[in-house]
Amino acid sequence: DAGVIQSPRHEVTEMGQEVTLRCKPISGHNSLFWYRQTMMRGLELLIYFNNNVPIDDSGMPEDRFSAKMPNASFSTLKIQPSEPRDSAVYFCASSHMGSFTGSWQPQHFGDGTRLSIL
Amino acid sequence: QQQVKQSPQSLIVQKGGISIINCAYENTAFDYFPWYQQFPGKGPALLIAIRPDVSEKKEGRFTISFNKSAKQFSLHIMDSQPGDSATYFCAAKGNTGKLIFGQGTTLQVKP
């Protein structure tokens, strides 16, 4: 079975440029999560979607970050303009979320996009 | 109150030894406590998970011990192997479905 697919795997760009990260969740999963991982802050949830609708974007650091999920099989995370402090590994994860209490399906992570802003 | 505190930050164990990683939480509304394993260049992968109404769960060499009154849980890796060398994250799930992750523990198992 195909897992969560992220692209690109690596991105190096100059400060001020627009960066778009892409994610294809596992087929049949209805929830999608974007995380950022750094040595200093660990694994932080940026935003998550349920049935293509953004549910919680409280982790999005600032207005330079935006995320969309136009359909059940695709999501993007965009940074515009990018800054050196945005350098991190960005992970996308998906799961099937039924009721929020009493059951839980694990989140499956992609292999991440390593982003370097010069 | 949403934090999950994990220790130690790093751990070195001899092959065949027991690796123990500890986590503590404050929010009593958390209802699932998974552990994730991450290898370099890869995303975290679910290792084992426990609900707060269970005190222990074992899967192969991996065991979660859960102490609800102390709001603590731990991962024990028995007969640790060099292939277990990875970063381990504890996490807690709230009623919104979000996972709150600990800071991670880098485990090195020496041959």
Image (cartoon, rainbow, N blue to C red):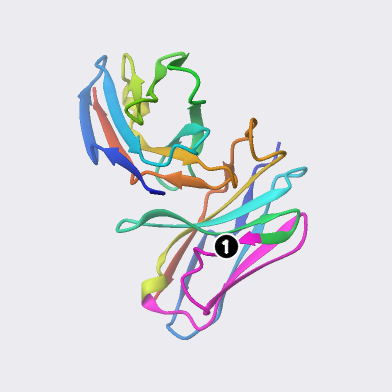
- For residue A105, side relative to residue A98 (left or right): left
- For residue A30, side relative to residue A4 (left or right): right
Residue range (magenta):
A55-84
Residue that extends furthest to the bottom in the rendered view of this protein: A16
The answer to whether residue A22 of the structure is visible from this angle is yes
- Of residue A25 and residue B70, the one placed in the foreground of this image is B70
- The residue drawn where x is 64% and y is 30% is A102
- The residue drawn where x is 24% and y is 22% is B111
The answer to whether residue A118 of the structure is visible from this angle is no
Q: Helix, strand or loop at disc 1?
A: loop
- The residue drawn where x is 22% and y is 33% is B11
Please say whether residue A59 is one of the residues in the magenta stretch: yes
Question: What amino acid is labelled 1 in the image?
Answer: Pro
Would you place residue A39 above or below residue B36 in this image?
Answer: below
Question: Quadrant where the C terminus of chain A lies?
Answer: bottom left
Would you place residue B17 above or below residue A61 in this image?
Answer: above
Q: What percent of the width, then of the height, locates residue B83? A: 37, 26
Please say whether residue B37 is one of the residues in the magenta stretch: no
Which image quadrant is residue B63 in? top left
- For residue A46, side relative to residue A85 (left or right): right
Q: What percent of the width, then of the height, locates residue A75? A: 68, 62
- The residue drawn where x is 24% and y is 16% is B17
The chain to which mark 1 is attached is A
- Of residue B47 and residue A46, the one placed in the foreground of this image is A46
Would you place residue A115 above or below residue A101 in this image?
Answer: below
Q: Which residue is mark 1?
A: A8
Question: Quadrant where the N terminus of chain A lies?
Answer: top right
Q: What percent of the width, then of the height, locates residue A97? A: 69, 41
Would you place residue B33 above or below residue A42 in this image?
Answer: above
Q: What percent of the width, then of the height, locates residue A8? A: 57, 62
Which image quadrant is residue B78 in? top left
